[in-house]
Amino acid sequence: MARPKPNPEQIREEVLTKAQQIIQKKGFDALTMKELASQLSMSVGKIYTVFAGKDAIFLELEIQFFKEVITGIEEVFAQKLPSPEQLRAILQHYYDYASSNLELYRLVTAPPKVFSQYIGSEFEPLARQELEVALKSMKQLKEGLNQALPLHIKMNTEDALQRYIFLVNSMHGLIINSHSPIFPYITNDDSSLVENSYQQPSKSKIVAQQLENIMQSVLR
């Protein structure tokens, strides 16, 4: 009896899922075609029938990441919340998704290659697709901010841009720093740390307060 032909879409989903798991646990450098094949009990040749190389897997993962960001923001927009609450919900979604996929977020925000490096290569069409979806996600984040900004700030395009840059940088800092072991120990009461009497607040409480601080800073 003939073996059933491999399902390319099934292989694609299995490879992307496993690739993200490897990145999340070991980092991007640990992602190789050999490692994927080993963990999937699949031949390297079978993976190459779907992906032309590691770059293709990386670009597909980036596309998935930005699509998830877009979907979450669109769901917030659909709720028709008042502008400040809408922006708060967008930032919470962005933080939650990026934080729960931290290593992929690190990869997306510090990629091994950028679009210009793919021009003229076999990966250019996929890289262009990744660029387009990344720009769309950033456009939606900017739109969420613009809807919440006071009118006099909206009219000043340079001021609005600087606030957007501040927002992106602040969110990046929060996402990365909230995974540091010292994150809950930043306090004005240094003596309590020395005496080991510091009452550590929950991480979620600190994150919520920092998100609120970011909100107030960009809107004031």
Image (cartoon, helix red, strand yellow):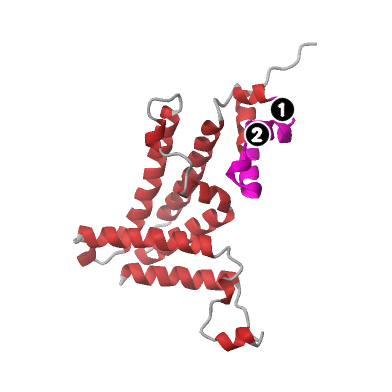
Q: Residue at x 42, y 52 (%)?
A: 78
Residue 135 position within the rendered picture, expressed as x and y whole percent measured from the top left: 37, 44
Residue 178, placed above or below residue 185: above
Q: Which residue is mark 2?
A: 14
The magenta segment is 17-43
Residue 139 position within the rendered picture, expressed as x and y whole percent measured from the top left: 34, 49
Mark 2 crowdedness (10 Å alpha carbons): few <14, some 14-19, many ≥20: some
Q: Main SS of the magenta segment?
A: helix
Q: CA distance from mark 1 to mark 2?
A: 10 Å
User: With 112 as the anchor, is 42 left or right in this view?
Assistant: right
Residue 153, placed above or below residue 202: above
Where does the N terminus fall, quadrant-wise? top right
Q: Residue at x 67, y 34 (%)?
A: 36
Quarter residue 99 falls in:
bottom right
Quarter residue 113 falls in:
top left
Residue 63, placed above or below residue 205: above
Check if residue 31 falls in the magenta segment: yes
Disc on the earlier residue, 1 or 2: 2
Residue 32 position within the rendered picture, expressed as x and y whole percent measured from the top left: 63, 35
Residue 128 position within the rendered picture, expressed as x and y whole percent measured from the top left: 39, 33
Residue type for callout 1: Met
Residue 208 versus residue 179: which sits nearer the camera? 179
Where does the C terminus fall, quadrant-wise? bottom left
Residue type for callout 2: Glu
SS at mark 1? loop
User: Pointers 1 and 2 in contact (CB under 8 A)?
Assistant: yes
Which mark, residue 42?
Answer: 1
Q: Residue at x 24, y 62 (%)?
A: 159
